[in-house]
Amino acid sequence: MGNPMCDSDIENLASFKKLVRIRSRFVWTLTAILISVLAGNIYLMSLGSELGSQKIDDDSPMTIVLVYSLVSIFFSGACCIFYAWWANKYLDSMVVEIRYDVENVKVNSK
Amino acid sequence: MKYLAVAAVAAFLGVAISPSVLASIRNIDVDEQSPNIVAILIFLLFVGSTLAITYWAAKRTKSREAFYTASGGITPWQNAFAIAGDFMSAATLLGITGLLFFVGYDAYILSFAIIIGWAIMLMVIAERFRNLGKFTFVDVITCRLQGSSIRIFLSVCSLLVIMFYLIGQMVGAGKLIELLFGLEYNVAIVLVSVLMVVYVTFGGMLATTWVQMIKAILLMFGGAAIAFALLSRFGFSFDTMLEASMRVHANGANILKPGGWLKQDLLNVISVGLTMSLGIMGLPHILMRFFTVKDAIAARKSVAYATLIMSVFYIFILIIGFGSIAVLWQNPEFYDGAGDLIGGSNMVALHVARILGGDWLFGFMAAVAFATILAVVAGLTLSGSATIAHDLYSVVMKKGNPDPKTELKISRISVFIIGALSILLGLAFETQNIAVIVPFALALAASVNFPMLLLSMYWKGLTSRGALIGGCITSFFTLVLIVLSESIWVVVLGNEFAIYPYVYPTVFSLPLGFLSMWVFSLLDKSTTADIEKTLYRSQFIRSETGIGAMDATDH
């Protein structure tokens, strides 16, 4: 799977550490938010069904849980667009930088 | 190869126009859904064009890389439509709208939980998966886990998920085609199998992807047309449409409140939510699509676009599901003498299409429903053949050094075997309720495949022994809970009450999956375990950066 020395070199690269730190912070934060959104919907369908069954206002038949589900879908779609945009803009350049650094390490070791 | 292709197309045409098929097109009256000429024409157009694509793809499918992954040459948008198409199955179009029609809001958990799951999958799984694997999801998990046992276990799990899913699709296809086109059930099953074998054997992943893309576009178009026509009946006011539905439905305003299906039971809701949102991350035929694009960046874009496409589609599903109540609930033309909806709950979307757009829209949607099943079974078959030929033959039997041409040959032979098996199983399960089959596939994917995939990617301590023992325990536990649930214990075995009271076992089996794999990995003090832990560092770097990952050209 790879040379352990080389792996260790890569792991110690500042650019690699930065990539891992930023990616994991961003990804796990968004994931936690998405899981919370799912948990909210589950709550409104079970323990909080009384709240979920309430109308959003007197003039509309829509219930809170239905609106919440629709918002969940839009929010998840928005998260995907945002993540793809963010990763294209920031992560990919970091990966390019790491690959460049790795090539340099290889060249220097020769 | 060319002769084989000609033979296969001839075989299809032979089946399609054979006297038995023609004889099986029964003359049934309108109330029983007589064969619709528009549906037949659109379906023949779909089959004709996809066979032409298969012929074109066959010329480009000369290697195992091309067969399994289209040599990584699919663009992100194409892959997005194919991924979305894989998930927008007949169960989605027909099943969810039918469930919304009868039980109301609760059915929508089958939609929003999936979309949230896809968003999580994009961030947590997609790029790493593409960076670590080659052809199948088993490749990714065994990236650092040693030995044949774990690969054999995962291959069996993979094949089980595929076969259960396939049975569900085949039985659904047989029933649907019987109803829509007036074809006999067994003829319909053979027809679907022959087409699926032709697509996959000759066109491999390239043809399967194109079939899926075309179908996804048709399905989106059909969904949009019905949703638009429904809303237009109510002055494009969603509120007015809902009010009209509430007025006629037996449950009145309760259709917009939770409880119609899952009875506001926390564990039941969690179980369905987890199965839908996490089960998708363990489905082999979906995961395999990440290898059809050139790199992790393209995989990321594919999933992001696919999530958007599905989000739009699930909005259409909501409109169709609730809108159909307003136009269909009290329409006597679509109920039989006993007061049941003609064709059952799965026919809601198609009945609505007939009401809104007459024979043309009904015919179009019927053909799209058939195309949907065809495309999904083709994807499942390809995934199954990759598991047999690559995971079992190439890696386990040949220790990773097979003759590529022999592997490709075995892939194609296994497509024929899966095709034959799907006919036999489709016939054997004809009278069974398919609702008992598909949940097992999803529950197994969510409880065994997903935890193992996630732990292998993110936890250094996972060992092959821990994964194997934990996987076996969880599979067995999942199976037991499904047998004890209402769908088998009551419906199939005829008992009065279900011992396990929830729809899916996932609320218990998923935590057990994580826990057992974690505990048995911690207990594993073998030398192999040490090696596997050491290899995690390389795997981690590769998953983060793509350094050492398979490029499209390596495929």
Image (cartoon, rainbow, N blue to C red):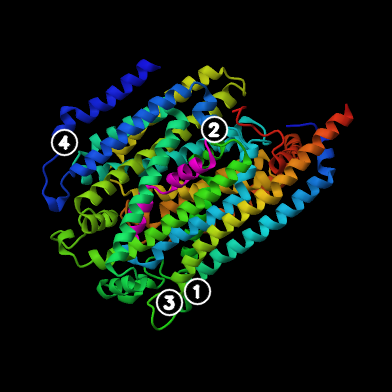
- The part of the chain drawn in magenta is B74-99
| Callout 4: chain | B
Which comes before the other along the chain, label 3 or label 1? 1
Number of numbered discs visible in the structure rendering: 4
- Foreground: disc 2 or disc 1: 2
- Foreground: disc 4 or disc 2: 2
Q: Can marks 2 and 3 be said to lie on one chain?
A: no
Question: At 69% across and 41% down in the image, what residue appears?
Answer: B543
Please give the residue where the numbered disc 3 appears in the rendered image.
A53
Please give the residue where the numbered disc 4 appears in the rendered image.
B24
Question: Residue B109 at what x, y percent from top left?
Answer: 44, 62
Q: Is residue B230 above or below residue B308?
A: below
Q: Residue furthest bottom?
A: A58
Residue type at tag 1? Leu
Disc 2 versus disc 1: distance between alpha carbons?
A: 48 Å
Question: Residue B53 at what x, y percent from top left?
Answer: 39, 30
Graded by Cα atoms within 10 Å as few (under 14), some (14 to 19) or many (20 or more), the crowding at tag 4 reads some
Residue type at tag 4? Ser
Disc 1 is placed on an element classified as: loop
Q: Is residue B92 magenta?
A: yes
Residue type at tag 2? Gly
- Foreground: disc 4 or disc 1: 4
* B367 lies left or right of A26: left
Does residue A46 appear anywhere in the picture? no
Q: Can marks 4 and 2 be said to lie on one chain?
A: yes
| Callout 2: chain | B
Q: Nearer the viewer, residue B434 or B143?
A: B143
Does residue B3 appear anywhere in the picture? yes
| Callout 3: chain | A
Disc 4 is placed on an element classified as: helix
